[in-house]
Amino acid sequence: MHIRIQNLVKKFGETVALKGVSLEIQSQELFFLLGPSGCGKTTLLRLLAGFYQPDAGELLFGDENMAGIPPHRRNTAMVFQNYALWPHMTVAENVAYGLDVRGVTGSNRKQRVSEALGIVQMEPYADRSPNQLSGGQQQRVALARALVIKPDVLLLDEPLSNLDAKLRLEMREEIRRIHDQTRITTVYVTHDQKEALSLANRMAVLRDGQVEQIGEPRTVYREPANRFVADFIGETNWYPAEITAFVGAEATLKTQFGLFQAASTKPRKAGDKVLLGIRPEAVEIGNGPCNELNTIIRHVSYLGEVEQYGLELAPGILMKAFEQNPAEIRLVGAPLQVHVRPANALLMNH
Ligand code: ATP
């Protein structure tokens, strides 16, 4: 189902939760709404479900305008973070609920319940009560309950945030598998950028009721539209800088720690004040073709798969850096030469 959202505005009294949001979600897409708490993600999801009506703007499912169409006539299904299963019904009865409401009975009902439980690999648990299941299993049942009605649009509201870290990773893979198998157009709300980066076909980053950027995970991560998106989607070291030359697509910058080369997709000119962003993982240890920096290690934090350093570039100027699979022990106070490839630098308007 193709979804078109045009200039959608939603107010709650004085609060403007959505300030004219426009975006398109393609049929069969796994689309993420990502942003910090209060940015309007849940409000947008609820507008899609029909739980709220917009104050202005349009929402179209395919060619059909959703204005005034109540939730039960939209053929959407929502999964909540707290599962919202009925405790007095078995797993199978919970899953069948949406079919009962729609008047699906007999062998068709039975077959669809077992098909939906099959998709989430919960068939053996059909006769159990939800309180005899783990959190992850309950979330699978909640997914089956949504899938059983064969929705045109599946709406997921932070579906994994009640699960512990390891289970969350496992369920991420499950959601991907289920989406690959069903190809249901899915809108997934989260504030977890790793969840969005690892699963999304495309995502919209929201801030304060507005869309800051729409794109594929790699584009949003590598070419963030602004500092807010860059900071929200990952970690970045920021330094004020001034362009001294711009040749081809590469800028020479004057920084507090010397000259620096950075690729720029936008044209720049000498004298422009910019912010230079360097992701911690873009810092490479050892010599390089350019942007070699002689630093002093000021902090070390061992995290197993990665070691995190605070490097001093010049008096009082620090840079966070990651080293994958650290084998060598590096000590605070020791010098460390690093380099950054120009293509891995971010440039933002100051
Ligand atoms: P979170 O990640 O914390 O759930 P969110 O991005 O989903 O946040 P929304 O729940 O959509 O954000 O809220 C957006 C804004 O609208 C917030 O300022 C919130 O306080 C306000 N808001 C949401 N629902 C209501 C409501 N029913 N009544 C009044 N204000 C509301």
Image (cartoon, grey):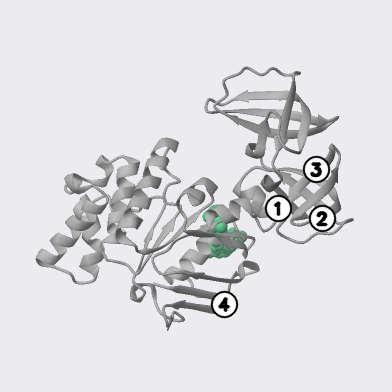
- Measure the C-alpha gap from mark 3 to mark 2: 12 Å
Quadrant containing ligand 1 reads bottom right
> Between disc 4 and disc 3, whose residue precedes?
4
- Give coordinates of residue 195: x percent, y percent: 48, 48
Instruction: State how far apart marks 1 and 4 are (Cα).
Output: 30 Å
The secondary element bearing badge 4 is classed as: loop
Residue receiving disc 3: 260
Q: Nearer the viewer, mark 2 or mark 4?
A: 2
Q: Is residue 149 in view from this perspective? A: yes
Crowding at label 1, few (<14), some or many (≥20) Cα neighbours within 10 Å?
some
Which badge, 1 or 2, comes first in the chain's sequence?
1
**What residue does disc 1 label?**
227
Q: Earlier in the sequence, mark 1 or mark 4?
A: 4
**Which residue carries the number 2 mark?**
246
Disc number at residue 341? Answer: none
The residue singled out by tag 4 in the image is: 55
Residue 121 place in picture, x, y as percent:
24, 47
Give the CA separation, mark 1 to mark 3.
19 Å
305 in relation to 223, above or below: above
